[in-house]
Image: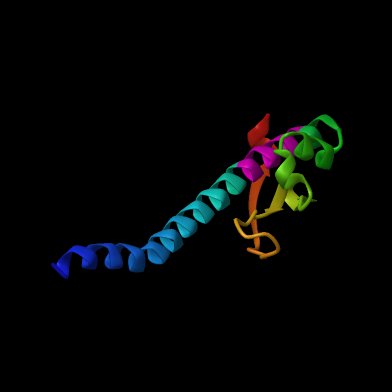
Amino acid sequence: MPEDGQAAVETVALLPVLLAVLGVAWQLTLAGDARAAAAGAARAAARAIAAGSDAEGAARAHLPERLERGLRVRAGAGGTVRVSVRVPGIVAGVGLGRVAAEADLGASR
């Protein structure tokens, strides 16, 4: 009957690996969500510049509150607007870099 306890021990041993895989998957989901939000904010900023409005304010209005703190908006040459935001982490205080998106003023008209 020693095999009865072996399955429980193996399950307990694999639990940290399973949690790590789930954590990485969730972090990738957060990064993808931040990238999609940055793309929407970049399009809003490009529309604002085309209309003569505040690009950063327009981008901020199109971001979820959790991403507003790390917002950067840069209008480049040729009518391109670049918006970048910090990637939120599942562990507080761990910096995971930034994601960025660009929109062209001509494409938003």
Asked whether residue 82 is drawn in magenta, I would say: no
In the picture, measured across the screen, residue 56 lies left or right of residue 6, that is: right
Q: Quadrant of residue 21?
A: bottom left
Identify which residue is drawn at 48% across, 59% down: 24
Between 21 and 85, the one lying in front of the other is: 21
In the picture, measured across the screen, residue 53 lies left or right of residue 67, that is: right
In the picture, measured across the screen, residue 25 lies left or right of residue 57, that is: left
Task: Answer whether residue 69 is visible to the viewer in this image.
Answer: yes
Residue 85: x percent and y percent? 70, 52
Identify which residue is drawn at 38% across, 60% down: 18
Residue 38: x percent and y percent? 65, 45
For the magenta stretch, what is the residue range? 37-47
The main secondary structure of the magenta stretch is helix
Q: Give the vertical position of 33 relative to 87 (above or below).
A: above
In the picture, measured across the screen, residue 66 lies left or right of residue 49, that is: left
Identify which residue is drawn at 86% across, 33% down: 53
Residue 47: x percent and y percent? 74, 33
Give the farthest residue toward the front.
1
- Which quadrant of the figure contains the N terminus? bottom left
Between 48 and 1, the one lying in front of the other is: 1
Task: Answer whether residue 79 is visible to the viewer in this image.
Answer: no
Q: Quadrant of residue 79?
A: top right
Residue 34: x percent and y percent? 61, 47
Q: Quadrant of residue 90?
A: bottom right
- Which quadrant of the figure contains the C terminus? top right
Q: Give the vertical position of 72 relative to 12 (above or below).
A: above
Between 28 and 44, the one lying in front of the other is: 28
